Image (cartoon, grey):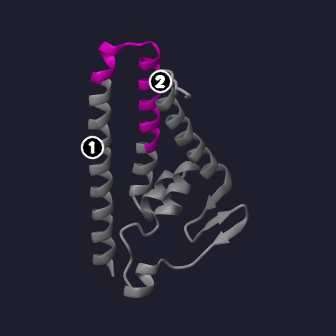
C-alpha cells in the first residue's frame, strides 16, 4: 500500500502564488487593449456580452477585461474610466499573491506562532478585497445605468 507523504510546509501556498503570478504575466504578455477592444496575439476578441444582447443594458462587469488589460500595461486612468473595478481586481490579485508568498515563507520556516495570525489577516484581507470589488462593480453599474 502506497503512502502519500504530506506536502512540504509552504509548498501549496507557494504554488498558488506562482499560478496567480503566471496568470497575470500571461494576460500582460498575450493580451493588448484599447478603449474599443481587446486583442489576443493580434486577433481582436469580439462580441457583445449576452446580458447586453438580451437586455440592451450594460452588465456590471462591462469593460472589465479591457480595464484589467489596460491596468496591466500601466494605463490606469483609461482603465479606471472603462471600469474602475479593473485596477482594483489587479491590485487584489497582486496582494493575494504576495500574501500567499509570505504565508509560504512562514510555513516553510515552521513559524507556527505566526502562521495562525497571518492566516487570520489573510482571510480578513480577502474579505475586504471582495467587498471592495463588489462595491466598485455595483457603483460602476449604477453609474452606467444612470448615464443611459
Q: Residue at x 27, y 70 (%)?
A: 142
Which tag, 2 or 1, sits closer to the chain's start?
A: 2
Q: Indicate yes or no whether the magenta region holds residue 100.
A: yes
Question: How far apart are the alpha carbons under marks 2 and 1?
Answer: 24 Å
Which label is found at residue 128? 1
Looking at the rendering, the stretch of residues picked out in magenta corresponds to 93-117
Give residue 45's position: percent from left, percent from top: 62, 71
Residue 60 in the image: above or below residue 146: above
Q: Is residue 19 left or right of residue 44?
A: left
Examine the rendered structure and indicate whether residue 55 appears above or below residue 113.
Answer: below
The chief SS type of the magenta part is helix
Image quarter for residue 128? top left
On the rendered structure, is 55 left or right of 53?
left
Q: Which residue is mark 2?
A: 10
Residue 89 appears at what percent x and percent y?
42, 50
Q: Position of residue 136 (x, y in %)?
A: 31, 57
The residue at 56%/78% (across/down) is 47
Answer above or below: position of 6 versus 129.
above
Q: Residue at x 65, y 65 (%)?
A: 39
* Contact check, label 2 and label 1, Cβ < 8 Å: no
Amino acid at each position: 500500500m502506497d503512502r502519500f507523504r504530506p506536502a512540504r510546509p509552504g509548498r501549496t501556498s507557494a504554488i498558488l502564488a506562482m499560478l496567480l503570478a503566471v496568470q497575470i504575466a500571461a494576460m500582460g504578455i498575450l493580451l493588448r487593449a484599447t478603449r474599443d477592444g481587446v486583442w489576443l496575439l493580434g486577433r481582436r476578441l469580439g462580441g457583445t456580452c449576452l446580458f447586453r444582447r438580451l437586455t440592451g443594458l450594460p452588465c456590471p462587469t462591462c469593460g472589465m477585461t479591457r480595464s484589467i488589460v489596460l491596468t496591466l500595461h500601466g494605463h490606469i486612468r483609461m482603465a479606471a474610466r472603462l471600469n474602475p473595478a479593473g485596477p482594483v481586481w489587479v491590485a487584489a490579485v497582486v496582494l493575494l499573491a504576495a500574501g500567499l508568498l509570505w504565508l509560504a515563507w512562514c510555513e516553510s520556516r515552521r513559524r507556527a506562532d505566526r502562521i495562525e495570525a497571518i492566516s487570520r489577516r489573510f482571510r480578513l484581507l480577502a474579505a475586504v478585497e471582495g467587498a471592495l470589488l463588489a462595491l466598485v462593480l455595483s457603483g460602476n453599474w449604477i453609474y452606467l445605468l444612470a448615464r443611459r
